[in-house]
Image (cartoon, rainbow, N blue to C red):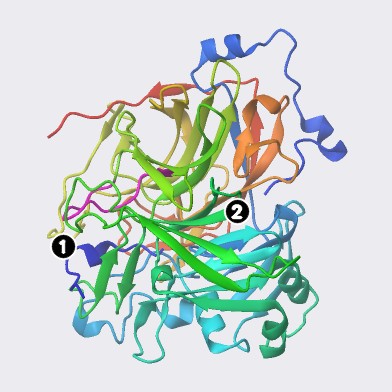
Amino acid sequence: MKKSVVLAIFLIAAGCEKPADQNQASQSTPTPANVTRETVEAASPIPYSITLEGFTIEGFPGLHSAAMAGPPEKLVMIGGRQNGLHNFPANNSAGKDPAFPKARANDTIYVLDLKNRKLLGSAPVGSLPPNVVRQFMATNTQYELLDGWFYIMGGYASDPKTGSFTTLGFVTVVNFDALADAVMNKQTLDATFASANIVQFEHPALAITGGQLELLPDTSGGANDFVLAFGQQFDGEYTTSGGLVNQTYSDGVRVFQFTYPTNSAKPSGINFLTAVPNPPGQQMDPENPYHRRDYTLLPSVDASGKRRLVAYGGVFKGGRIEGFLNPVFIGSGAKTVVLTPNTSTSQLLSQYDTAAIQLFDSRGGSGTIYTTFFGGISQYYWDDATKSLKRDPLNLNKTDNPKDGLPFINSVSTLKMPTSNDTGIQYLHAGATFPPVSAIPTCTGSSGNTSAPYGGTECKFVIASGAPLATPGVLQLDAITSTSVVGYMVGGIASTDPYPNGATCASSMFYQVRLNPAQPTSTVQLQLPPSP
């Protein structure tokens, strides 16, 4: 067991309609016949533009770090938190002023219709079996929807044995439609419901929070591998001095499969396959590329069109308060995965888990991946006065405004990466912000309502129903031929300042995302600033 001191301070706990239906036809802008891919790219390296429309849904309080699944017309949200960024209580005051107050853990399941902007139903989880309740109220779980079953793994949750917190070592699997229908029809979620619609498995390798869960095909036989990538195990109360805690990064990727009865998608067992690398790297090695958590994991494709995953950003390098700049590719193997750090690409903005859209354009050789990031927490930030990236020096001793060098930002940027060589360049969307100036959330505090213009952290992008996909989770850019709604931004932490010192909240704003494939984005190529 390790005692966490400095690094423990910085644990941050943290959909789409059809591209154009008849009701939207008047809002769609067809691509002019004389506009070609070449003319669009000549105007900008990012050949599309994105507009955001903010809205709220009555009855939804705002969440971040929740598990969510389903189409935007029936989106289910479970767990997470209703308050903003955790605080940093001293060890001797954690009991009366906990970093994660139990009263602000989300104990309600919400079913939302983002397309029609309404709450379809909500239901408390308290009558379900105790371990199901714990996972359904956890923060930063990992989750996936497969064949009608919603898998929720790990997460940071209260520990009834100690009165403190722990990282859960099990996975709860629930019938998605049965759960959504029960919530919408105001049926009781209790032991009887759980017996018919929920199964739960336990395994020590599942005890991860701040990681991500995705699917890859197993090359040995076509089964689905569940890829539990990076993250950490954190057991204990969160305080500035660490207290008596265990903090261990996974330093790699864990691969699972589930077993199923004949002709059933309901899992009956869990098989741990492998951990990569094995053994893992050293916890305090700053050059270990797998020592990351609270990052963005997105599906992608390689030069041959095969599905792979890309881990973007993440924190913290071993022994340092720094984010990661080099992505890591995660590819399929035979009951394993293959990890490849991309040292030829630097991601300069949005290191912390943030809202992002992954697009693939198959035209022009092997194609290009565009990853558009929205705000979040970043190692660098754009200084409009000097038209350059900057980084704040670490200053934790300054009592009036301490800085950890990882501020909230509101920049929108896109990493353009040709699959032929995986060498990416990141571009700032000039003049764009997230949240947009037309729909900035507010945080309510002791001094009233305060504008919170820094968003994206722990926000998620939900792809529109019917949107063209290159692989699940990746929009097929060259198949989007007119201005279309491609998805929605959901949840996240809203911040009043780059270093808010407590002035944050769970955002209750949603954003409809509209993409115009014929209007290029005005961009600035980002350059790594010189070392101080």
Viewer-nearest residue: 454 or 210: 210
Mark 2 neighbour density, 10 Å: few (under 14) some (14–19) many (20 or more): some
Q: Image point 70% across, 67% down: which residue?
A: 176
For the residue marked with disc 2, what is the amino acid? Answer: Ala
Point out which mark residue 399 bears: 1
Q: Position of residue 42 (x, y in %)?
A: 52, 10
Which residue occupies the foreground of this view, 211 or 386?
211
Amino acid type assigned to the residue bearing label 1 in the image: Thr
Q: What is the distance, in whole Å, between disc 2 and disc 1 at their CAs?
A: 54 Å
Would residue 76 appear left or right of 41 to someone viewing this image? Answer: right
Q: Is residue 274 left or right of residue 344?
A: right
- The stretch in magenta equals 310-323
Q: Is residue 366 above or below residue 194?
A: above
- The front one of 39 and 60 is 39
| Image depth: mark 2 or mark 1 in front | 2
Label 1, secondary structure: give it. loop
| Residue 436 in view in this figure | no
| Residue at screen point 67% across, 89% down | 191
